[in-house]
């Protein structure tokens, strides 16, 4: 399975490393796109070492083979997973805002490719009416599946819902997502090629 992992800027970003390791060990191909804020929690080189491919960090990083990076990356996967999905990225998705590499790639994902959201944030943020409204909007679109955050003591010291679900549970949701029969590939790429690279 081809998995695109979108990592946004939250303390739970380090658990996306564990998810990457689990996915690779399970035989999946995985590419990573990160927001700049995410790199403040986990260095891109960590994901590059785990997944074996460069991380996409910028819309203008440099298209290969004449492809537009964010479009090629959005068309490559069979499943997309946003881990962690912060309040910020959820709001952008719900309102159609594409102002960084992650939100732009997510907006370019073709209909039919499932997008898994794994929210993680402070309890008060998770329970905020705007965040809950955004989750409702995203659910109504029919293209997003959510791995609900769990209740526990959070990094900030609060206790309540908002912690990232376990990487094992997230991977299970990814693996059971309904796949489109034929997922598109970027121009000139083959089944095993990374976005924007030759086979």
Image (cartoon, rainbow, N blue to C red):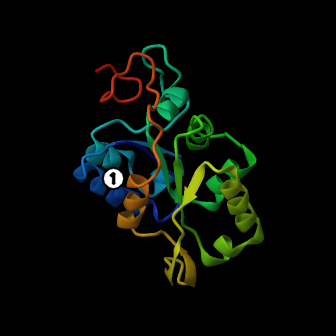
Say if 127 sits above or below 101 in the image.
Answer: below
Residue at the disc numbered 1: 20
**Residue 140 place in picture, x, y as percent:** 71, 55
| Left or right of residue 41: residue 112 | right
Is 81 displayed left or right of 103 in the figure? left
Determine the residue positioned at 37% across, 21% down: 189
Question: From this viewpoint, is residue 60 visible?
Answer: no
The residue depicted at 67 percent of the width and 49 percent of the height is 93
Can see residue 134? yes
Label 1 SS: helix
In the rendered image, the quadrant that contains the N terminus is: top left
Q: Position of residue 171 (x, y in %)?
A: 38, 58
Q: Which residue is rendered at x = 71% and y = 65% of the image?
A: 131
Indicate whether 92 appears above or below 11.
above
In the displayed structure image, the side of residue 120 where residue 92 appears, left or right: right
Q: In which quarter of the image is residue 186?
A: top left
- The location of residue 152, given as percent across then percent down, is 49, 83
Percent position of residue 151, x then y: 52, 81
């Amino acid at each position: 399975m081809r998995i695109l992992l979108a990592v946004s800027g939250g303390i739970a970003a380090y658990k996306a490393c564990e998810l990457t390791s689990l996915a690779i060990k399970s035989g999946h191909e995985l590419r990573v796109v990160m927001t700049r804020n995410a790199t403040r929690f986990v260095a891109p080189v960590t994901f590059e070492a785990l997944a074996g491919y460069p991380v996409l960090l910028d819309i203008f990083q440099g298209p290969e083979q004449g492809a537009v990076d964010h479009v090629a990356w959005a068309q490559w996967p069979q499943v997309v997973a946003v881990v962690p999905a912060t309040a910020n990225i959820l709001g952008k998705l719900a309102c159609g805002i594409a102002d960084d590499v992650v939100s732009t790639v997510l907006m370019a994902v073709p209909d039919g490719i499932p997008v898994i959201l794994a929210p993680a944030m402070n309890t008060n943020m998770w329970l905020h009416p705007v965040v809950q409204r955004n989750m409702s909007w995203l659910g109504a679109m029919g293209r997003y599946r959510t791995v609900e955050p769990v209740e526990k003591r959070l990094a900030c010291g609060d206790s309540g819902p908002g912690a990232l679900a376990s990487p094992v549970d997230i991977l299970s949701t990814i693996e059971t997502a309904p796949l489109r029969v034929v997922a598109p590939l970027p121009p000139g790429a083959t089944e095993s090629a990374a976005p924007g690279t030759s086979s």
